């Protein structure tokens, strides 16, 4: 009888703890699953894959920034000054085509979004992955993106959510801290004041070499590009003709292109980009820009902290060029062929070995 009594008490206490956890998580809702932020608590934005869905569902905005790490240093304040309206930033580190498309569908189906800013694709070969590919090494919480209330238990009884978000929110409130939310300018931004840029950021360039045979894009790979662009870019744009999509091709550094050349993959990459560009130009509500062939950016290592990631001043330059519809960067049906040719001329004939000798 005594054992039964203790078991009953244990079960009641355990059930009570679960119930309290669920109630606190639902009430404060740090991932915005049920509502917008409360004004009396402070919300830390620090988990893009967990919080982006709630942001696009419940925040007030008419424009958004999304995409890969190439977009994380964009400042919504700058975007609002240049494009007008009210922006949220919902980027993903290492975003895949499908991941971004899922979020955009969610945002666009929730309400009227007049403008989207995103990198069209990165140049690391992502559109050669399957159209439904999700990045390995990242936890993709699909239960936060669907409309099934039954799997909300994964959120409501989540130990990490309780310890890392709910408890600190309550503690801050008890200590008299003001309510609020992490500014979107800083949300997901990786740039730090002590970041090292320039040649010293690249310790070893021995992989750079010239005269490497290059592989062409296979027909199977070309179809993968088509499937990716069709499902994850074009279908979204066609479903929402009221929205203008500002897509840009980011300026990965000349060293990154040199790495692709050294692997014999640069011709394949450029041919894949040509296929994607051709398809994107077919939609009236897509504006396509590229900064990938601007040697003033990509060949100046002072802009880069590693092979792909440029500093915030380049993000500013990209926003300004798109807002002013700078003809130097806009790709149209009339100049697309010339753009691909300039990309090929710059990177297929570059003296990569010379970069190894830079001081």
Image (cartoon, rainbow, N blue to C red):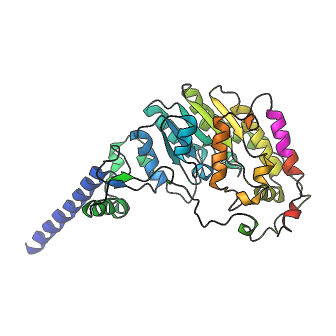
Side of 327 relative to 9 (left or right): right
In screen coordinates, is 34 left or right of 103? Answer: left
In the shown orientation, is residue 317 left or right of residue 348?
left
**x then y, percent, for residue 155:** 35, 53
- In the rendered image, the residue lying farthest to the bottom is 2
Q: Position of residue 278 (x, y in %)?
A: 75, 33
Residue 334 falls in image quadrant:
top right
Which residue in the rendered view is the most extreme toward the right? 211
Q: Is residue 154 visible?
A: no
The residue drawn where x is 81% and y is 38% is: 339
Quadrant for the N terminus in the image: bottom left
Q: Which residues are magenta?
A: 335-344
Q: Is residue 62 above or below residue 200?
A: above
Depth order, front residue of 262/65:
65
Horizontal relation, residue 82 to residue 346: left or right: left
Of residue 206 and residue 235, the one placed in the foreground of this image is 206
Is residue 208 something one can see in this rendering? yes
Q: If the image is split into quadrants, where does the C terminus sit? A: bottom right
Is residue 41 placed above or below 323 in the rendered structure?
Answer: below
Q: Nearer the viewer, residue 351 or 271?
A: 351
Badge count:
0
The residue shown at (31%, 48%) is: 39
Q: Nearer the viewer, residue 331 or 86?
A: 86
Is residue 280 a member of the stretch shown in magenta? no
Return the x and y of residue 168 as percentages of the image width and height: 33, 63
């Amino acid at each position: 009888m005594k054992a039964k009594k203790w078991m009953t008490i244990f079960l009641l206490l355990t059930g009570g703890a679960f119930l309290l956890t669920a109630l606190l998580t639902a009430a404060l809702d740090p991932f915005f699953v049920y509502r917008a932020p409360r004004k009396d608590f402070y919300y830390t934005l620090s988990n893009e894959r967990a919080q982006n869905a709630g942001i696009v569902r419940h925040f007030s905005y008419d424009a958004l920034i999304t995409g890969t790490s190439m977009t994380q240093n964009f400042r919504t304040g700058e975007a609002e000054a240049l494009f007008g309206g009210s922006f949220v930033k919902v980027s993903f580190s290492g975003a895949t085509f499908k991941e971004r498309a899922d979020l955009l569908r969610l945002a666009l189906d929730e309400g009227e979004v007049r403008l989207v800013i995103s990198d069209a694709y990165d140049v690391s070969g992502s559109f050669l992955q399957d159209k439904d590919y999700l990045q390995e090494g990242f936890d993709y919480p699909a239960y936060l993106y669907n409309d099934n209330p039954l799997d909300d238990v994964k959120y409501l009884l989540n130990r990490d959510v309780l310890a890392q978000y709910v408890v600190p929110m309550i503690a801050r409130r008890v200590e008299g801290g003001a309510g609020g939310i992490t500014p979107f300018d800083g949300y997901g931004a990786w740039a730090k004041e002590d970041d090292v840029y320039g040649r010293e950021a690249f310790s070893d360039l021995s992989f750079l070499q010239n005269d490497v045979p290059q592989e062409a894009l296979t027909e199977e790979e070309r179809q993968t590009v088509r499937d990716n662009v069709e499902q994850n870019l074009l279908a979204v744009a066609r479903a929402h003709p009221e929205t203008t999509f500002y897509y840009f091709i980011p300026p990965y550094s000349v060293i990154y292109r040199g790495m692709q050349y050294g692997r014999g993959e640069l011709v394949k990459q450029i041919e894949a980009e040509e296929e994607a560009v051709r398809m994107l130009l077919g939609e009236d509500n897509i504006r396509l820009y590229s900064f990938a062939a601007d040697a003033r950016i990509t060949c100046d290592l002072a802009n880069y902290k590693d092979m792909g990631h440029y500093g915030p001043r380049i993000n500013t330059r990209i926003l300004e060029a798109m807002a002013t519809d700078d003809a130097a960067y806009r790709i149209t049906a009339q100049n697309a062929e010339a753009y691909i040719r300039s990309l090929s001329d710059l990177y297929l004939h570059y003296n990569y070995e010379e970069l190894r000798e830079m001081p």
